[in-house]
Amino acid sequence: MDEDLDYLRQVDLPESMGGGQKFVTDKIKDEEEKEKEIKDAVANSMDGGQANYLIRLAAYGQAGLEMLDWPEGWERYCLATDGREIRVYGRWFKTKVGIQIIVKDKDSNIYSRGVLTTMDPIIDIANVDTLIIQAENTIDSAKGILLSDNKDTVSSLKRTQSGIYLPN
């Protein structure tokens, strides 16, 4: 969360102080280069067969999950599945050939979401990215900061000059 706040504060600075549009452009360019390297590694794993591809795709998903700001006591896993049922935390989950993300909160509630793989790296990576965003939404909802939860979150936020909302 601190990293996000630092980012937003940097964006709010004028360009003469190293902030603003130039900062955002440079940050996005760096992130895109890193993501392209990872996506290329996933795409190149197709040569090793479906199992190797799924394992690489799951590793990509796990890396994305680890980049999120997780509350204390939460657990998360990104798994390659082959269609057999899997047991997680004493619960059975039906799967198909694809990627499964499982999140357990501190109250032992289990959230699970999966996608079928198409064996097309561009589509599969986009699907895994969507799962990661959904996991992040689950975290934000638990924190009470997901605006679509119909909670009064705006009153606990302050607005910067450029219109960005930050926690008080």
Image (cartoon, rainbow, N blue to C red):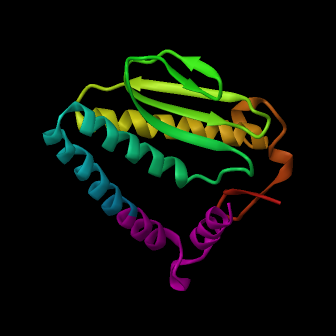
Camera-side residue: 143 or 97? Answer: 97
Camera-side residue: 159 or 101? Answer: 101
Q: Is residue 146 visible?
A: no
Task: Tell me residue 71's x, y (percent).
Answer: 72, 50
Tell me what residue is drawn at x 62 percent, y 62 percent: 4
Task: Tell me residue 124's x, y (percent).
Answer: 32, 33
Tell me what residue is drawn at x 35 percent, y 64 percent: 29
Magenta stretch containing residue 9, yes or no? yes
- As drawn, the residue found furthest toward the left would be 47
Residue 150, quarter of the rendered image:
top right
What is the span of residues highlighted in magenta in the rendered image? Answer: 1-30
Task: Tell me residue 123's x, y (percent).
Answer: 29, 33
| Image position of 93 with respect to 38: above or below | above
Q: Quadrant of the C terminus?
A: bottom right
Q: Is residue 125 visible?
A: yes
Tell me what residue is drawn at x 24 percent, y 52 percent: 41
Q: On the picture, is 129 further left or further right than 76?
A: left
| Image position of 146 with respect to 24: above or below | above
